[in-house]
Image: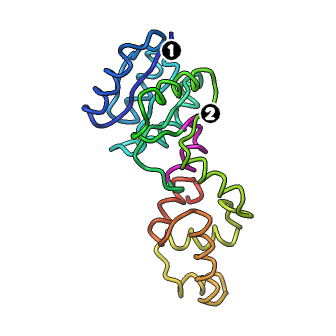
Amino acid sequence: MIRLLIVDDHPIVRGGLRDMFADAEDIVVVGEAGDGAAGIERAKVLAADVVLMDLRMPGMDGVAATAALREWAPSARVLILTTFDSESDVLPAIEAGAIGYLLKDALPDELMRAVRAAARGESVLAPSVTQHLMGQVRRPGAGTLTDREKEVLQLVANGSSNREAATVLFIGEASIKTHLQHIYDKLGVRDRASAVAEGYRRRLLT
């Protein structure tokens, strides 16, 4: 019997998922949680085999909770279930240790198969997620910042303007703009604020 834990901040979503799995002969919903921190505690106490994890929740989000579960409940397999499938959402979740990533428009049978596959240690990805990952692999150096790009991103995170960052690094302001564009491309974002947020999420910033 697969022990399933549902972690989502919307009670209606949790209730719908619980009802969906009620008729499954080999899956039992052992508990629910409304945020990542509670999900970690319940995964440990309830010895969950699979954790169906929402991505964006108040407090500790799904990415942080997934990463923490690798330490606190390493036997639990995390299957992300969310409405978000942008590259900036997908990659951090996979890097954090999620075994699968599905969207909430998945059919019930598809979700059941995904939970069973996750319990067996098999990866399950929505088609759009697979495309993101393939695109990441095909782009030379994608996702990996150079040391100089990390320096630029850190200065931006500290509140430096392009001119101030250029002064600190003894390079031209145009070079800063070029580095920023490379950072945006590699992190899958479009602006400074998103780049900083993604940098913290990927633990590139201190």
For the point 46% across and 29% down, the residue is 111
In the picture shown, does residue 152 fall above or below 103? below
In the rendered image, residue 117, in percent from the top left (x then y), is placed at 58, 25
Residue 92 is inside the magenta segment: yes
Look at mark 1 in the image and give the residue it sits on.
Answer: 2
In the rendered image, residue 9, in percent from the top left (x then y), is placed at 31, 37
- The crowding category of the residue bearing disc 1, from other C-alpha atoms within 10 Å (few below 14, some 14 to 19, many at least 20), is some
What is the number of the mark on residue 37?
A: none
Q: Is residue 52 left or right of residue 90?
A: left
Question: Observer-nearest residue: 2 or 175?
Answer: 2
Question: Observer-nearest residue: 143 or 25?
Answer: 25
In the picture shown, does residue 191 fall above or below 172? above
Residue 138 is inside the magenta segment: no
> Outermost residue toward the left?
12
> For the magenta stretch, what is the residue range?
89-100
What is the number of the mark on residue 123?
A: 2
Question: Observer-nearest residue: 89 or 158?
Answer: 89
Tell me the amino acid under the disc marked 2: Ser
Tell me the amino acid under the disc marked 1: Ile
For the point 47% across and 72% down, the residue is 191
**Tag 1 or tag 2, which sits nearer the N-term?**
1
Q: Quadrant of the C terminus?
A: bottom right
For the point 58% across and 62% down, the residue is 187
For the point 25% across and 32% down, the residue is 12
In the picture shown, does residue 21 fall above or below 194? above
Q: Give the secondary structure at mark 1.
A: strand
